[in-house]
Amino acid sequence: MVVKHPVTLKGEFTRLTKVTQLLVSWNHCLSKLKSHVMASSNVTSSVPHGGFHPVSEWLPTVTVGSMWIMAGKVKWVTDIEKSVLINNFEKRGWVQVAENEDWNFYWMSVQTIRNVFSVETGYRLSDDQIVNHFPNHYELTRKDLMVKNIKRYRKELEKEGSPLAEKDENGKYLYLDFVPVTYMLPADYNLFVEEFRKNPSSTWIMKPCGKAQGKGIFLINKLSQIKKWSRDSKTSSFVSQSTKEAYVISLYINNPLLIGGKKFDLRLYVLVSTYRPLRCYMYKLGFCRFCTVKYTRSTSELDNMFVHLTNVAIQKHGEDYNHIHGGKWTVSNLRLYLESTRGKEVTNKLFDEIHWIIVQSLKAVAPVMNNDKHCFECYGYDIIIDDRLKPWLIEVNASPSLSSSTASDRVLKYGLVSDTLNIAVPGGMVPDCRWNKSPPKEVLGNYEILYDEELAQGDGADRELRTRPSQSLGSKGGRSRDPGRTLSTNWK
């Protein structure tokens, strides 16, 4: 890494801390800092000719104990050539460099993150370098591991005697039943067969664990439909070859909420800045993805992915795909529709439960997540709502698509990246991973804080939630909503 020469400032630690915090939000504070620095007898400084430039262009380097403010422009790299990324970097005046050069910010693919944190590479990130994935993000974003971690989380809460793990008379979780019944194949094949035979008329959906955009997905309603995939023809025993791709098989939600007769799901964006303590943000501008063909339970249409899968990568090839709106609807439009057809109270309850699902899924993986200080992550949550207005977590994406299928799509994703950068790289400054980044509300844009573990522990909300589920589980217990509160208040 390039050695940066610090301006040494002794004493007055408290006043300097306040000044540096103001730098993030107000550019004019730089001139005040300049006057302060120049007046100090213990300071030597080389100020750029012509005075102080905007925050994104120049900041002095200050050292006080272990606190740094790095100098210079942010140097960025990406292996994802998307205009919504590059335009955001350039707008901030950041400088593009090559991967093998000294960089501060790397927006990378999930394939690259494996190499960065690989034991073989031995690569160590410096305090002024951040990346957009946690090392083992797959604990949440790989379909089989997500289910595994949620199951473990439920069992741990049950073992603790937590009221969150309470079950009904049929053995179903009252508050943690938010993922469809799921088995891993080939490992859980016998367990799946046993479950299938309990309800032989059910429909199941098979998905490869490591693929996205609807690739490799198919529906079954008979065991014979997967025998070719799952059994050796000679021995009739399950083939568990290491070369066979791992799948998850889940009970299909065959009663989805329909709008205009069509199935849809929700794509919601959630930003995690740290897992321990857990701090996450919900993006307000999510959207619905609609199928192009009206939904039917007819078994003759099980192979018709235009009926069953909402992925744009699939639907855009349909004859009825609309290139103007892209088969998408904003979450705000969905909310208005539900308020007008089902009522405001029921709609609020639904969205409270969606927020609940997201927080609990993050809590489920937090203990096993490598909480590297150089990392943040923006996840794409896929939620399906059934006709009883019960939300189900389908999967979580580590690299939600930044491609734009429509003009409004491009505006949304440009704003998503911009607001994400404002939180991940406060003030557009060269990052310092030793800071406890908790940006002020003014810079959140369309993000709202969904859960802050430090605040939750501070006011005892987590303890209350564990001991008073009937009142703390939000809409499940009839909790009244306070529109003046942030989402973090709802889900502490």
Image (cartoon, grey):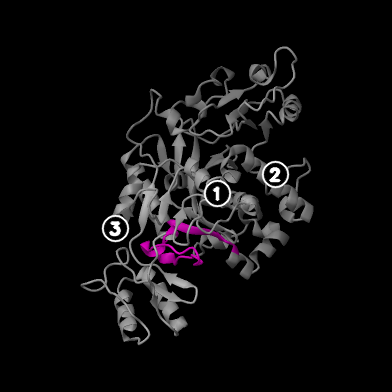
Q: CA distance from mark 1 to mark 3?
A: 28 Å
Residue 149: image location, x then y, percent? 66, 45
Q: Are marks 1 and 3 in contact (CB under 8 Å)?
A: no
Mark 1 — residue?
135
Q: Are marks 2 and 3 in contact (CB under 8 Å)?
A: no
How many other residues sit within 10 Å of disc 1, few (<14), some (14-19) or many (≥20)? Answer: many
Q: Is residue 140 magenta?
A: no
Q: Residue at x 33, y 80 (%)?
A: 44
- Furthest-left residue in view? 50
Residue type marked 1: Pro
Residue at image x 73%, y 42%?
A: 172
* Residue 49 in view of the camera: yes
Disc 2: which residue: 151
Residue 10 is labelled as none
Between 277 and 218, the residue placed more toward the observer is: 277
The type of residue carrying mark 2 is Lys
353 with respect to 261 (left or right): right
Numbered disc in front, either 2 or 1:
1
Instruction: Tell me if mark 3 has few (under 14), some (14-19) or many (20+) residues whose alpha carbon lies within 10 angstroms of its own.
Output: some
Q: Residues within 10 Å of mark 2 (few under 14, many from 20)?
A: some
Q: Mark 2: which secondary structure?
A: helix
Residue 98 lies, in percent from the top left, at 35, 48
Q: Is residue 442 magenta?
A: yes
Mark 1 or 3 closer to N-term?
3
State the extent of the magenta-drawn residues as a range: 424-453
The numbered dot on residue 93 is: 3
- Does residue 166 show up? no
